[in-house]
Amino acid sequence: MPRPILTPILALLLLAGPLFAQATEFTLEDDGVWAQTDAPEPGTDEHVMWQARRHLAEGRPGQAVTVLSGWLDEHGRTRNPYLAEAYFLRGEARLANDREYQALFDFETVIRDFSATPYYARAVQREYEIGMAYLGGLRRRFLGMRIENARPLGEELLIRVQERLPGSALAEQAALDLAQHYYDRRELKLAAEMYSIFRSNYPDSEHLRFAMLREIECNIARFKGPRYDGSGLIDAKILIERYRQRYPGESARTGIMDGLETWVDESAAQHALENARWYLRTKDEPSARFLLVRLINRHPGSDAAAEAVGIMEQRGWLAVAPTPVARPQDAEELENPVPRDAPREDVP
């Protein structure tokens, strides 16, 4: 079930319903005492805002939309000081009226045109809530029915939250939520990238350790086998070392990093061995010899290294002078070759 979109401000307004019904307001005096005051004078802009709040508090969001839309039609192109509040309240009313997509237009107006007002952060908060509802399964309306997939829009909204309130607790939570969303959907490359962004943007976060472990997990899980792209293993190995440096006690206590590093090392070695075998099958012996030598040097304790030694002994390469080191771009191409004659996974 999609989770409902909660708007805390509406809850406060509902609690204040009886006060509005009495056409009164309360203000906080300098001495800390709440003082009862008269309602705004009818016919003023302040009174229109008060009417909209009253309709919201008494459960009539449709009437609030009508009041605010009429006022905005008249004042929308002016410099009226109540414009930001009016757009925000109409967004709240549309949200309460189960029209969250329409509400986004009002919240976007607040964010775009009134960034210096207190309503800016509130509008970003509402967009975060709508985005989370869409990621949770809420669909957009189409022809009056909720049948349109809104997940891409939900992802975009969480990205916007991070851009609009950088460094805030809300942006940090949005980054974690979006990474978790990708992880749950097994979009592991996107999840790993999002956790990497989180590490970069929030290096002192209390969730950093979790993000590092999850990024390592995503990079390892992306590796489908020796015949596929092994770049994720390189990222995982680098991150494991960084984790060890940042959390030395935790790594020593659990031994998790030792086991992961052993698995990553062996997998990377098997990947290099498979590439070398492919070059042997395509009669490119210099490239094969280069990869076998580097495999033995980088992963000396792996099973793949033992196989590499055996291949080189059979071909008499152990007595040959070391293969010259290729340029960096050549080395990268050798590790992940793109054969012209057949897809990699089709190689027997």
Image (cartoon, grey):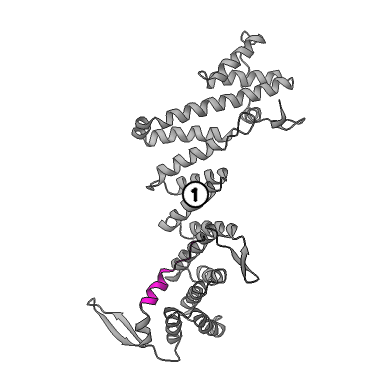
In the current view of this chain or complex, which residue is farthest to the front?
Answer: 1
In the current view of this chain or complex, which residue is farthest to the right?
Answer: 341
User: Is 229 in front, or is 114?
Assistant: 229
Mark 1, secondary structure of its residue: helix
Relative side of 317 to 264, left or right: right
Q: Does the magenta stretch mainly form a helix, a strand or a loop?
A: helix
User: Is 49 in front, or is 143?
Assistant: 143
In the current view of this chain or complex, which residue is farthest to the left?
Answer: 31
User: Is 203 in front, or is 94?
Assistant: 94
**Label 1, residues with CA under 10 Å away: few <14, some 14-19, many ≥20:** some
Give the percent coordinates (x, y) of residue 176. 46, 51
Task: Please name the residue shown 42% across and 49% down the image.
Answer: 202
- Say above or below: 66 vs 258: below
Give the percent coordinates (x, y) of residue 303. 55, 19
Mark 1 lies on residue: 180
Relative side of 167 to 334, left or right: left
Task: Please name the residue shown 33% across and 33% down the image.
Answer: 249
Start-end of magenta stretch: 3-15
Residue type of the residue flagged with mark 1: Gln
Instruction: Tell me, yes or no, whether the highlighted magenta stretch contains residue 300.
Output: no
Q: How many marks?
A: 1
Q: Quadrant of residue 243?
A: top left
Give the percent coordinates (x, y) of residue 73. 57, 83
- Say above or below: 339 vs 21: above
Q: Quadrant of residue 221?
A: top right
Instruction: Tell me, yes or no, whether the highlighted magenta stretch contains residue 11.
Output: yes
Q: Quadrant of the C terminus?
A: top right
Relative side of 330 to 16, left or right: right
Relative side of 297 to 285, left or right: left
